[in-house]
Amino acid sequence: MSGSATGHDDHGIGDRLATAANTDHAPALECVVVRYRERSDRCTFAPRECTEAEQLTQWLSADIDTVVDLDNVR
């Protein structure tokens, strides 16, 4: 048992989040868009620097109409 509420080793994730918060370097993200006929298109983001195996657990998907350009909303 890891001692985490989720049963997973969250120590590595916490370290990575702390490092990311203290850096000026934004990780490059790869974006893949899947288009659908009957529903909203989906956009999936994953870090470009990850291995294919790591991308299986380090991704985020959202409906394409919820994705915005940060430069336009700042």
Image (cartoon, helix red, strand yellow):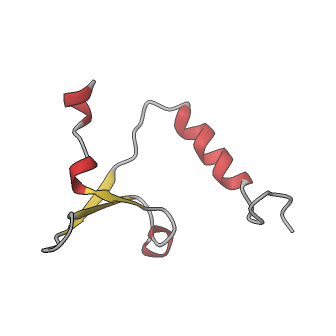
Position of 27 compared to 20: left or right? left
Q: In the rendered view of the protein, which quadrant contains the C terminus?
A: top left
Q: Where is residue 42 in the image (x, y as percent from the top left)?
A: 26, 64
**Residue at 50%, 69% in the rendered image:** 54
Q: In this view, does 70 lie above or below 74?
A: below
Position of 47 compared to 68: left or right? right
Q: In this view, does 60 lie above or below 71?
A: below
**Residue at 47%, 73% in the rendered image:** 56
Residue extending furthest top? 74
**Residue at 23%, 41% in the rendered image:** 68
Position of 31 compared to 19: left or right? left
Q: In the rendered view of the protein, which quadrant contains the N terminus?
A: bottom right
Q: Out of 74 and 36, give the one closest to the viewer.
A: 36
Q: Out of 5 and 17, give the one closest to the viewer.
A: 5
Q: Quadrant of residue 9?
A: bottom right
Q: Position of residue 11 (x, y in %)?
A: 74, 52
Q: Where is residue 69 in the image (x, y as percent from the top left)?
A: 22, 38
Residue extending furthest left? 37
Total marks in image: 0
Q: Is residue 38 above or below residue 28?
A: below
Q: Out of 6 and 46, give the one closest to the viewer.
A: 6
Q: Where is residue 47 in the image (x, y as percent from the top left)?
A: 40, 57
Q: Quadrant of residue 17?
A: top right
**Residue at 23%, 55% in the rendered image:** 64
